Amino acid sequence: MQKQTKYWIKDSLIELLKDYDLEEITVKQIVVTANISRPTFYRYYATKEEVLEELINDMIQGYAVTAMETVPTTFDEVLKIFLDYFQKKQSIIKVLIRAHLTDYFTSAFTKGFVERIDEFPASWRNWETNLQISLGAQFATGGLINVLVGWIATGCEIDSEIIVRDIMMILHDLNE
């Protein structure tokens, strides 16, 4: 029941974000939309921001599981998995874009990437120091998420394989 209740709360927040900015949404609106009591909300979350954070972290965790199950061996495979996974989550990401909340997503994704970098070995990544890991994670995730947000905002009109091909070309050109 706990999992279902948390789902209702997160789903209610997404529904409300379609019409309101996060700052305008109240806990009362969330509980009414979720058809739960205020004490039930507070049993799981202290704030609406915690709900948003968990919603985003759920997506990121889902991506991490997908990436680990797929075991990409090249960077272009990583890009393809990333785009394909989040394309399936585009309805939620579109709501985050409309609500100007992509910074939450970027920040959480970058933090999660840095925390779990050792779980994702990559032959092309030779970051050794904490500074290199931090800079690499910020640069890579910031760029990827900007591409993702732009792609989703346009309805994913361009095939993900074309985007991967062009990103790889751009990275190659930057290295020249």
Image (tube, grey):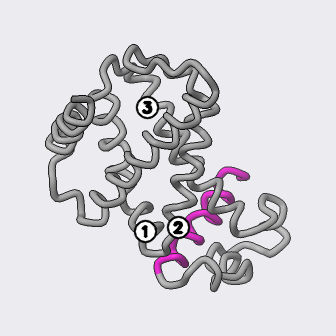
How far, Cα to Cα, is label 2 from label 1?
6 Å
Q: Which residue is mark 2?
A: 101
Magenta span: chief secondary structure: helix
Picture residue at 17% right of the left edge, 35% below the top? 169
Residue 74, quarter of the rendered image? top left
Amino acid type at mark 1: Ile
Query: Are dots 2 and 3 in contact, CB under 8 Å?
Result: no
Q: 10 Å neighbourhood of mark 1: few (<14), some, or many (≥20)?
A: some
Position of 24 relative to 109 (above/below):
below
Expressed as whole percent of the image width and height from the top left, the position of residue 140 reads 43, 39
Quarter occupied by residue 162: top left
Q: Earlier in the sequence, mark 2 or mark 3?
A: 3
Magenta-drawn stretch contains 2 = yes
Q: Give the mark, 3 or 1, whose residue is nearer the N terminus.
A: 3
Q: Nearer the viewer, mark 3 or mark 1?
A: 1
Could you tell me residue 59's position as x and y percent? 51, 47
Image disc number at residue 97: 1
* Viewer-side residue, 24 vs 76: 76
Residue at the spot x=55%, y=78% of the render?
16
Q: Which residue is mark 3?
A: 66
Q: Is residue 143 magenta-colored?
A: no
What whole-number distance in Å separates the C-alpha atoms at marks 2 and 3? 24 Å
What is the magenta range?
1-18
Residues at marks 3 and 1, CA–CA distance in whole angstroms = 23 Å
- Pointer 2 with pointer 1, Cβ within 8 A: yes
- Give x and y (percent) for residue 56: 56, 53
Mark 2: give few (<14), some (14-19) or many (20+) Cα within 10 Å: some
